[in-house]
Structure formats: C-alpha cells, structure tokens
Image (cartoon, rainbow, N blue to C red):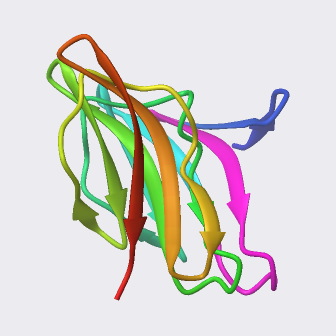
C-alpha cells in the first residue's frame, strides 16, 4: 500500500522522501529510511546505508547529470558522498552541495570551530 503525505511515500517498514531529478529528466534519486538507517536510491539502486542523511544536504545532480552527491551523518560527523565515494569528514555541513559547473562544486562546512568554504574540482 502506498500513501502520499506531503512529499513522503510510506511503504511497510520504509519511508521514502521524494528528492531529486536530473536536469535532463533521465536520472532520479530519493532518500529512504528503513530499520533505523538512511540511504539514497539512485536510478533504482540502493546506495550504502548510513546513520542519517543531512536535511541541509539534499541529493543533487550536476547540471549535465553526470555526477550525483549528498551529505550524510556517520556517528558524530558529516561528509559528502559524491558518485558513491565518501569525502573528508566535518563536524557539520551547512549547505547543499552546489555545482558551479559539470566538474566543480562547493559547500560550507564546520571543522574544529572553523567555518570553511570547501571547493572541489572533479576529474
């Protein structure tokens, strides 16, 4: 049975949040929780399960849909997962991943009391 509640689908034992569609409409991702763990389903395939997914870091596609990322919680730290690879850990990540182009992105993070603008270039 499927019930729609303001952007949330409920399945037995699982909650699904509708989240992200690529700009060209060819790729789709959403957050889900099951058995106390959170995970992203990308193009129909479940990603790794974590303690939580950041509410400030919505799953996002790069402008051309080639790259995909989100912010997660693991124990007491946060980090970005981009194209399935975990990035550097921070105390907190304040913003969504923001793609500047197909191959560059940035976000705002807190580490040891300092706030950093983290910028990345993809190969």
Q: Is residue 66 above or below residue 14?
A: below
Residue at 33 percent of width and 56 percent of height = 81
- Residue 14 visible somewhere in the drawing: yes
Residue 92 on image: x %, y %: 34, 22
Q: Is residue 22 magenta?
A: yes
Query: Residue 23 colored magenta?
Result: yes
Rendering coords of residue 107 (x, y %): 49, 44
- Quarter placement of the C terminus: bottom left
| Residue drawn where x is 58% and y is 42% of the image | 96
Q: Position of residue 17 (x, y in %)?
A: 64, 40
Would you say 66 lies left or right of 21 here?
Answer: left
| Magenta-tinted stretch | 12-28
Residue sitting at 85 percent across and 28 percent down? 6
- The image quadrant where one finds the N terminus is top right
Q: Residue furthest top?
A: 113
Q: Quadrant of residue 98?
A: bottom right
- Residue 20 lies left or right of residue 87; in this view the side is right
**Residue 11 relative to residue 20: left or right:** left
Rendered position, 35 above or below 2: above
Q: Nearer the viewer, residue 101 or 47?
A: 101
- Expressed as whole percent of the image width and height from the top left, the position of residue 55 reads 55, 27
Question: Is residue 29 at least partly visible in the picture?
Answer: no
Q: Is residue 118 left or right of residue 57?
A: left
- Disc tally is 0
Residue 30 or 36: which is nearer the viewer? 30
The answer to whether 39 is drawn above or below residue 111 in the figure is: below
């Amino acid at each position: 049975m499927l019930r729609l509640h303001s952007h949330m689908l409920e399945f037995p034992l699982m909650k699904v949040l509708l989240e992200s569609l690529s700009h060209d409409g060819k790729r789709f991702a959403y957050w889900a929780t099951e058995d106390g763990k959170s995970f992203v389903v990308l193009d129909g395939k479940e990603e790794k399960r974590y303690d939580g997914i950041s509410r400030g870091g919505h799953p996002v596609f790069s402008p051309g849909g080639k790259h995909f990322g989100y912010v997660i919680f693991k124990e007491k730290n946060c980090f970005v997962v981009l194209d399935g690879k975990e990035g550097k850990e921070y105390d907190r990540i304040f913003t969504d991943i923001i793609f500047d182009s197909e191959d560059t992105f940035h976000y705002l993070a807190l580490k040891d009391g300092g706030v950093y603008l983290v910028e990345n270039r993809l190969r």
